[in-house]
Amino acid sequence: MDKHINVRLLEVFVTVVKNQGYAGAQQTLNLSTSAISNYMSELEAYVGFVLCQRGRSGFRLTEKGQQFFHQTIKLLDELNNLERHAQTLKGDLGGTFRIAVLDATVLDKALSMPAIIRQFNEKFPAVHLNLQVRSPYEQVQGILNNELDMAIGNYPSSVNNVVEEKLYREQHWLYCSHLNPLFEQKRITQDQVIECGLVTRSYWNSADLRQKGFGHSTATVESMEAQLTLILSGKYVGYLPEHYAQNLVSSGQLRPLLPSVFGYQAPFSLICKRGRSKEVFIRYMREILVKQTKLQAK
């Protein structure tokens, strides 16, 4: 066995496991399945045991492969931390900063993400910024897997190994479009609204619906744009952030329904992995986020 293991082999291994096979890892790694197979064979020859099984039953790790995978994740995390720390000590504040937000936040004045990005870039012009749009669940998983350095969103519950800091509250109203029969009615009852077809986000659960007064939904979407599309069809009602719907309300295409009954506020927070909050990029981004959201709240 060679003295040192090739880190590239470990990175390929982790990507294969996360994508549950060679085919799924192709796009992420930008490698052919035969090349991935060669990497995996080399790694298995190095460690001296079989890491995974492939066949008609699908991809799965062996028992030893499962243990090796967990240790590999820890090692790659430590290497990433070491590289970031070395860059800080050197004063070479380059590298990549990966941050995720929810969709439809660009126009949210309470967050002012464009202004925040501008400040961050002026402070660290050499940093490659990777801005992603992910659901709350995907954000948390990205933080835990070190695929993300920071995320901003609405999180229903706390998670182990994740640090959360409250930022602001986003106002949501229940809307119908001008094509919906309720749009022109002067007096609307709660029962009439509940009888309408409701479109919700796929990551909402039944408890979220009950809390907002509904027993079930009749359509689900992955993005705010898709939700708006269904609401504008006139066949569904749905929740939208006030800032996102404001122009369509002004133009007479949307109407909020019984605001005193169906309105709610979603608390937005920033999250990062526990133990990383003092890293330079995370610390600075946190500072400008807190400062900006407090300034907009005044």
Image (cartoon, rainbow, N blue to C red):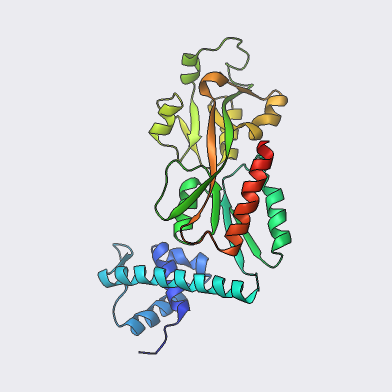
Query: How many numbered discs sit on the rendered protein?
Result: 0
Quadrant of the rendered image containing residue 177: top right
Query: Considering the image in quadrants, where does the N terminus appear?
Result: bottom left
Which residue occupies the extreme top position in the image? 187
At 55% from the left edge and 12% from the top edge, which residue is drawn? 188
Q: Quadrant of the C terminus?
A: top right
Residue at 33% over, 72% down: 68
Of residues 280 and 27, which is closer to you in this image?
A: 280
> Eyeballing the image, is 27 above or below 34?
above
Q: Is residue 32 above or below residue 42?
A: above
How far from the left and from the top, in percent, is residue 250?
Answer: 72, 25
- Residue farthest to the left? 63
- Residue drawn at (33%, 64%), measured in percent from left and top? 59
In the drawing, does residue 95 fall left or right of residue 71?
A: right
Rendering quarter of residue 66: bottom left
Furthest-bottom residue in this view: 2
Q: Is residue 19 left or right of residue 283?
A: left
Seen from the viewer's position, the closer of residues 55 and 94 is 94
Is 111 on the left-hand or right-hand side of 137?
right
Q: Is residue 33 visible?
A: no
| Relative depth, front residue between 148 and 298 | 298
Q: Position of residue 112 (x, y in %)?
A: 68, 44
Look at 64% across and 21% down and name the residue there: 178
Q: Is residue 248 among what the camera can see?
A: yes
The picture places residue 254, in percent across and down from the top left corner, at 64, 25
